[in-house]
Image (cartoon, rainbow, N blue to C red):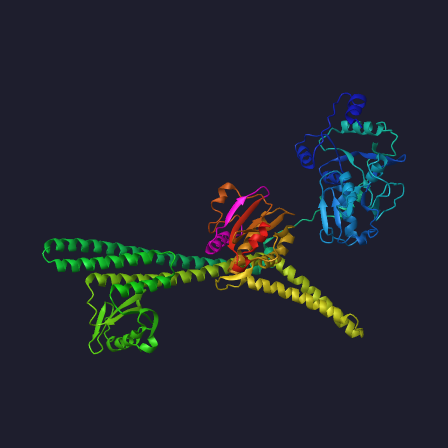
């Protein structure tokens, strides 16, 4: 129908009409900017515009078999051979296809019928898919068996049959309705056809002329049985349209949500209090960690200072020895003795330096090598390191000294203990002490090691008296340096252990904070099986009172299943929030990811987000700390859910690479801004108003503790985080399976 020609040339020649096809967003923008005088739109859109002064001038009219029609409906179709699909009660667990969820002439009409029949489109269908294409393609999808049921507008089947695009008896209508004076196939109530609408700013005189021109416009007469655009008629009432919009809670009938401080305190007072308490605990932890950090820096500065002092002393001693060598050239034996001592000292110092900077040795390995180096350097038969249990003036050796490490002949240990018992009565024992026992021909050197200015260890050298020479000044300085390094290493190890404890506690704080944010969804998840169990048990008690014992066992079994389900949810939650001791173990990565996804499923449903795990393997065993890895995956997936739009998707992708597995968490959100990429892993950096800013920082520290790196990058669909974990020894063959 050439509306532009009919209006401008014949009826209203003093005006020029331009028809602009616009999408919904562009149409709304043009209306708001007062760029249009008239619009042709759906009756649902007209209801929303009526509050702004819009008014219908005419209703689009179609024709079938010579009968004019001012209304239309929606049709549910399936293959004619599907004898199991006849009415709405057969639709559960079927796949449904429609053009768009916002389409008034299709999905929204059928959705009202489904809700009236007690069917939820979001929960009861196996699949609900939208094509965003033409409705003829929906018919083709049904013919190709891509979906079980399709939703189209009335009149399309008759039009396709008449045009030869559809063979008879191939498609049937589900839940057909019969309405007087409406011969077209339909499955829903009938609603007013599309409307020709004048906007509030349009001149009323011009609108009256257009209304008269539309009603007097000649009808489009053709030989076709069905004509979708036959002409225009008087405006049709919108009562059924208002009823549909009200039932579906669509504009202008969407419910309003009022949020007040009193309501927030009433509903989330416990959570808010817990968050405040956790914040104070976190602040105290940060202060404690800062204090420990300062102590560590102080210890490092002290060690560097001692190293510099030793280098200066060695340099000074070398110059003195050089001067003595020049003055005592005639005494070759003395010079050789001095040079030999210097070489030994340099060799010991070099060995001590190499041991102290070795990065591939543990603290205990360095200590054992240091004891062996000292024993050889000082030409002793045995070296013992004892731990001091208390600081009494006259300690009981049997209860206050514990052997921590030794090197050399262990048979000297009893003699060393006896010698300490007999000679350790002198309260001034901070300097090097030497004891000689002529009866047993033994010599003993002992030196106290302090930690935090308190006696903590004692280093003992034992050897034969005849074969040993007295320690030189350089030897004593080297011995002092060695004891200072041992003390500093013990302090550093204690600080690292305390830091690990605080990191573990901080991880628990973040997990508790995460659980607090997820509390609403988890409470709903737990309430469902508990409510089901209460209902089953109540039914069984009622049957027992009535004397009817039928199905009591079935009801009790189902109540037990519901209670077990609630127990599993609580157990998974308890396992997640426990502090745990950092450990390295083998565990099934896929099972852990499934547990995390189950824990996050309530939050995903609230955000209408789809969670899925993409992998070819049934199980993948990796090595690491299971609780910490689950915490990392939960934080990343939860962040992805919050970043994704409604009805978005979050995927966890697993890929085997050599002896490792790469874990990738992807979302369909807007991605991360470039300027935020550099600070996203910083502590206390958060893009959420109520976030602590520690989630990603802790995730990165956990992954780095597992000898890997947490990476982030934007992709075409959104954002993705990646890291790797080592495969367990018995899962190395997974790489061959992945390549095949």
> Residue 272 colored magenta?
no
Closer-to-camera residue (82/297): 82
Q: Position of residue 328 (x, y in %)?
A: 10, 56
User: How many numbered callouts?
Assistant: 0
Name the quadrant containing residue 367: bottom left
Closer-to-camera residue (592/22): 592
Name the quadrant containing residue 353: bottom left
Q: Position of residue 652 (x, y in %)?
A: 59, 51
Q: Position of residue 243 (x, y in %)?
A: 78, 46
The residue positioned 86% from the left and 43% from the top of the image is 169
Q: Position of residue 470 (x, y in %)?
A: 19, 67
Is 84 displayed left or right of 357 in the figure? right
Q: From this viewpoint, is residue 347 visible? A: yes
Q: Is residue 412 above or below residue 111?
A: below
Q: From this viewpoint, is residue 275 visible? A: no
Closer-to-camera residue (610/348): 348
Closer-to-camera residue (300/467): 467
Q: Is residue 377 above or below residue 658?
A: below
The residue positioned 54% from the left and 60% from the top of the image is 730
Name the quadrant containing residue 460: bottom left
> Residue 715 colored magenta?
yes
Q: Quadrant of the N terminus?
A: top right
Is 647 displayed left or right of 438 in the figure? right
Which segment did they paint magenta?
A: 689-717
């Amino acid at each position: 129908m050439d509306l532009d020609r009919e209006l401008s040339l014949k009826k209203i020649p003093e005006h020029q009409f331009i028809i602009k096809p616009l999408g919904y967003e562009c149409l709304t923008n043009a209306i708001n900017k007062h760029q249009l005088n008239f619009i042709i739109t759906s009756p649902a859109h007209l209801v929303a515009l009526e509050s702004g002064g819009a008014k219908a001038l005419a209703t689009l009219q179609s024709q079938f078999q010579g009968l004019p029609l001012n209304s239309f409906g929606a049709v549910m179709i399936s293959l004619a051979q599907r004898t199991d699909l006849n009415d709405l009660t057969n639709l559960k667990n079927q796949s449904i296809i429609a053009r768009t969820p916002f389409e008034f002439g299709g999905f929204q009409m059928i959705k009202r019928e489904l809700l009236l029949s007690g069917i939820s489109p979001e929960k009861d269908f196996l699949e609900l898919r939208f094509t965003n294409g033409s409705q003829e393609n929906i018919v083709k999808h049904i013919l190709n068996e891509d979906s079980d049921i399709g939703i189209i507008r009335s009149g399309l089947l008759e039009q396709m049959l008449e045009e030869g695009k559809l063979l008879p008896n191939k498609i049937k209508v589900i839940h057909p309705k019969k309405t007087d004076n409406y011969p077209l196939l339909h499955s829903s109530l009938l609603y007013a056809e599309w409307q020709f609408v004048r906007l509030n700013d349009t001149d009323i005189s011009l609108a009256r002329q257009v209304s008269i021109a539309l009603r007097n416009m000649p009808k489009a007469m053709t030989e076709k049985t069905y004509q979708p655009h036959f002409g225009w008629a008087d405006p049709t009432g919108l009562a059924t349209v208002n009823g549909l919009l009200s039932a579906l809670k669509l504009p202008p009938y969407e419910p309003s949500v009022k949020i007040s401080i009193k309501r927030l305190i009433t509903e989330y007072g416990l959570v808010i209090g817990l968050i405040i308490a956790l914040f104070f605990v976190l602040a105290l932890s940060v202060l404690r960690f800062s204090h420990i950090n300062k102590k560590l820096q102080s210890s490092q500065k002290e060690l560097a200072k001692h190293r510099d002092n030793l280098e200066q002393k060695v340099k000074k001693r070398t110059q003195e020895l050089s001067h003595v060598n020049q003055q005592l050239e005639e005494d070759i034996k003395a010079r050789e003795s001095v040079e030999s001592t210097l070489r030994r000292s340099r060799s010991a110092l070099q060995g001590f330096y190499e041991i102290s900077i070795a990065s591939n040795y543990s603290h205990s390995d360095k200590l054992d090598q240091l004891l062996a180096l000292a024993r050889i350097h000082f030409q002793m038969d045995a070296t013992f390191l004892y731990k001091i249990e208390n600081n009494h003036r006259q300690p009981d050796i049997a209860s206050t000294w514990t052997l921590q490490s030794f090197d050399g002949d262990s048979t000297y240990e009893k003699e060393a203990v006896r010698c300490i018992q007999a000679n350790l009565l002198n309260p001034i024992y901070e300097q090097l002490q030497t004891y000689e026992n002529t009866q047993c021909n033994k010599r003993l050197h002992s030196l106290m090691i302090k930690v935090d200015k308190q006696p903590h260890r004692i280093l003992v050298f034992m050897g034969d008296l005849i074969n040993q020479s007295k320690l030189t000044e350089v030897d004593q300085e080297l011995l002092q340096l060695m004891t200072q390094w041992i003390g500093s290493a013990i302090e550093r190890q204690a600080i690292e252990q305390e830091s690990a404890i605080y990191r573990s506690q901080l991880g628990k704080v973040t997990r508790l904070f995460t659980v607090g944010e997820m509390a609403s969804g988890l409470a709903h998840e737990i309430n469902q099986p508990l409510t089901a169990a209460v209902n089953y048990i109540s039914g069984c008690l009622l049957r027992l009172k009535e004397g009817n014992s039928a199905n009591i066992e079935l009801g009790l079994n189902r109540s037990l299943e519901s209670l077990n389900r609630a127990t599993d949810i609580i157990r998974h939650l308890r396992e997640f929030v426990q502090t745990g001791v950092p450990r390295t173990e083998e565990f099934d990565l896929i099972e852990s990811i499934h547990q995390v996804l189950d824990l996050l499923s309530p939050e995903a449903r609230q955000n209408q987000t789809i969670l899925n795990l993409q992998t070819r393997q049934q199980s993948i065993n990796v090595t690491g700390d299971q609780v910490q890895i689950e915490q990392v995956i939960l934080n990343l997936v939860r962040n992805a859910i919050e970043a994704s739009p409604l009805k978005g998707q979050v995927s966890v992708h697993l890929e085997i690479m050599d002896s490792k597995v790469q874990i990738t968490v992807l979302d369909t959100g807007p991605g991360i801004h470039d300027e935020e990429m550099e600070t996203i892993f910083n502590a206390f950096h958060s893009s959420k108003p109520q976030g602590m800013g520690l989630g990603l920082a802790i995730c990165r520290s956990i992954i780095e503790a597992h000898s890997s790196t947490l990476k982030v990058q934007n992709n075409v669909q959104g954002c993705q985080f990646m890291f790797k974990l080592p495969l367990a020894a018995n899962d190395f063959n997974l790489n061959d399976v992945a390549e095949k």
